[in-house]
Amino acid sequence: MRTISRFQGAILLALACASAVSAQSAPQQNPNWWKNAVIYEIYPRSFQDSNGDGIGDLNGITSHLDYLQTLGVNAVWLTPNYPSPQIDFGYDISDYDNIDPQYGTLADFDRLVAGARQRHIGIIMDLVLNHTSDQHPWFKESASSRTNPKADWYTWHDPKIVNGHRLPPNNWESVFGGSAWQWDPARRQYYYHRFYIQQPDLNWNNPQVRKAMYDVERFWIRHGVAGFRLDAITSLFEDPQDRDEPYVLGPDGKPLTNAYGDKVVQTIYTDDLPEVHTVIRQLRQVADQTHGRKVILIGETYLPSVTDLRRWFGAKNDELDLPMDMQVGFINKFDVSLFRQRINDAETKIDGNMPLFVFDNHDNPRWDRYVTADHKDDVGRVLSTILFASRDTALMYYGDEIGMVTTPPARKEDIRDPIGIRGWPKEKGRDGERTPMQWNSSPIAGFSPAGVKTWLPIPPSYARVNVAAEEGNPDSMLSWYQQLIALKKNDAAVHAGREVMLNPTDDRVLSWLRIAPDGEAVVVACNFTAQPQTIGFPLARYGMRGRVVRTLLKTPGAPNVSRAGQVQLGPYGVYIGRVE
Ligand code: GLC
């Protein structure tokens, strides 16, 4: 089991060394719809194949809008579906103003947006600004000479010559392994690529690049999107002096190495540079001024601390609406005090802004990374309770609601994600969290028509873990998610109430209070152990007149409230109750 997020690794390693370390109406009507909302991430390749090619598509997503409405989500974030050579499965874009034929057409996209709108669901587009595909006409032109009109659209650099040998300009590394510099024989220069070689980084110092991308933003706003998820947004700029990054040293004083065999660097010259905030403010202005309605900006912000996160809302709250808070969801250790501290930080250290909690996405092993022994589903219930019953906007990943688990490829030859091929066996890539959605117990799980070879195999769990089997079963994970989301939407305290941690020295049960502006309160308790626990709520201390709790939701089969103010929790049990 990996214990830290794949992308967070370098940051956390650096930190470890330094410190030993119902606003629920339609998006188009209510400018605050995204606060305390639920956003559902879809990996389009893997949600529903409507045309029998083994790959999910937009019409497949449209066919499940009723399912998403019943689940209760307010918005859907689609990972990229633009035309792309699909080296990084869509994060290498070759045309920003269209849809990849694998996924459908612009007309299909418009139908998806319209159908979602009818169901009060917003569509959030993934905007990849840091880099394009090397097949994008901009890059082809830029690479064609040192004097063409787009010569300066990407990050080109002369080589360093040492003893007559040509070397990359510095030690900057690709997140996906190896040097971040690629030699281009035509220009006789290197270009910088933070990700794959086929993903050259744009030069954001160039005003023409900015204008081109702001036009892309306008294009999709005009197609009705409710917002954007800004990919790799912290890494738009690099150090103008091209300084070498420092290495992260291990206890023996030698640089640590990663799964690709590279020395681990602290990305202080290639990530989170101050210049990026000017661009975010400009993106904000375009979002605010294009169509006269609220368009939200979400950021992919893997940052080392809550203090860093605070900056991304903007000094005048004029930057991102929802920089992702990876502090809570990617603790990756089932530890009560760590969760208590990080949730409390989100409540107290970001100036009342809205945290966006994330536990799962298409880049990291799913929630089952937290499970070390039995009680898998109950641990899933604990994690989802933290996600939905905290004061946050909740970002969930398709399939988590039915309890889909990480299913990495067993053999190197089956891998589709190139980092898995390069990093095998230490890094198996991201296929394990991108497997097809499990709709029913038919042989292809209802993802593709019968007899089709799906782009990634259907995980063996599909026979039991699938939508059809779980719908209508009150004890299923799907029912649990539906009930939690309904509470988040409809209960004033769970929806937007302030959050107060209870029993702050308890290291077995995480418990907290949500208090609505009118004083209505709800208690939440999650048992982090495999043993039964009894927990009391010191309500008087928080000015609560009520002394008893009435059950709103609890782990199936769990005991009830034993006596006033005390609750028994089974192993990894969850209890949510109203104070009366
Ligand atoms: C982001 C995406 C990831 C992608 C990378 C490069 O981190 O989430 O999937 O590979 O950016 O675009």
Image (tube, helix red, strand yellow):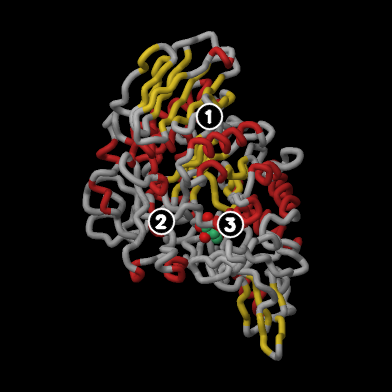
What whole-number distance in Å separates the C-alpha atoms at marks 1 and 3? 28 Å
With 242 as the anchor, is 117 left or right in this view? Answer: left
Q: Amino acid at mark 2?
A: Arg
Residue annotated with mark 3: 13
- What residue do we see at 51% from left, 45% from top? 331
Mark 2 neighbour density, 10 Å: few (under 14) some (14–19) many (20 or more): many
The label on residue 297 is none
Q: What is the spatial separation of the Cα atoms under label 2 and label 1, in whole angstroms?
A: 45 Å
479 above or below 520?
A: below
51 or 49: which is nearer to us? 49
User: Label 1: which residue?
Assistant: 505
What is the x, y in percent for residue 213? 66, 57
* Disc number placed over residue 45 in the picture, else none: 2
Q: Is residue 449 left or right of residue 32?
A: left
Question: Camera-side residue: 506 or 466?
Answer: 506
User: SS class of the residue under badge 1?
Assistant: loop
Hey, which residue is sitting farthest top in the picture? 545
- Image coordinates for residue 535, horizontal then vertical, percent: 43, 22
Lower sequence index among marks 3 and 2: 3
Q: Quadrant of the N terminus?
A: bottom left
Q: Earlier in the sequence, mark 1 or mark 3?
A: 3
Label 1 residue near ligand 1, CB within 8 Å = no
